[in-house]
Amino acid sequence: MELYSTILEKLGYDPLPSYEEPPETPVSQPELAKKYPFILITGARFRPMHHSEHRQIRSLRKLHPHPIAEINPDTARQQGIGEGDWVVIETPRGKIKQKAKLTSRIPSRMVESQHGWWFPEEIGEDPLLFGVFESNVNVLTPDSEEFCDLPTGAVTFGPLLCRIYPLKKFT
């Protein structure tokens, strides 16, 4: 384990680890948190899928047919969301839809969203691109410089501020 990085030091960065509040939290963005009151955790992994792979394998898709957003039951009740409902997850960058799974494993101020979703049964040509913009959490994540780790250039994919609400059904 390396606690003091001589490489980072040579590059002009702090060689010791330190805490810095992420750029989009209720602490760093209290005004934004009024519109987006929940903390979104992106990139939830699940079997049998691996990252964005295996959505096209019918037997695996039967095991896991829809993208899932895990929500605390109290939060869901306050937002008018029931188990299995389609919900909209929205950040300042966009909106996606996923199905609600209610679980007390998730704290009431947070939402956990699966990553890597696309739909091989959808049209592959532009602009649909297999429905990649419908439920893929990457639609909600930032790519601006303020969200990048300066020494590595890595983008932080969470925490992010979001709101969540039932998907309206049109009849």
Image: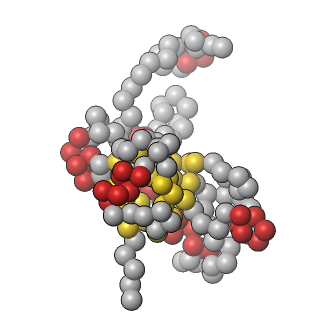
Q: Residue at x 38, y 84 (%)?
A: 170
Q: Residue at x 78, y 68 (%)?
A: 59
Task: Indicate whether 154 appears above or below 40.
Answer: above
Expressed as whole percent of the image width and height from the top left, the position of residue 128 reads 56, 77
Residue 144 in sight here = no
Left or right: where 104 falls relative to 128: left
**Of 98 and 102, the residue lying toward us:** 102
Q: Residue at x 34, y 39 (%)?
A: 25
Left or right: where 143 falls relative to 2: left
Which quadrant is home to the N terminus?
A: top right
Expressed as whole percent of the image width and height from the top left, the position of residue 44 reads 58, 48
Task: Indicate whether 21 appears above or below 16.
Answer: below
Q: Quadrant of residue 7?
A: top right
**Of 105 and 94, the residue lying toward us:** 105
Task: Indicate whether 86 appears above or below 27.
Answer: below
Left or right: where 122 falls relative to 108: right
Expressed as whole percent of the image width and height from the top left, the position of residue 138 reads 52, 56
Which quadrant is home to the C terminus?
A: bottom left
**Of 7 and 49, the residue lying toward us:** 49
Residue 155 in sight here = yes
Expressed as whole percent of the image width and height from the top left, the position of residue 28 reads 29, 35
Left or right: where 34 falls relative to 11: left
The number of callouts visible is 0
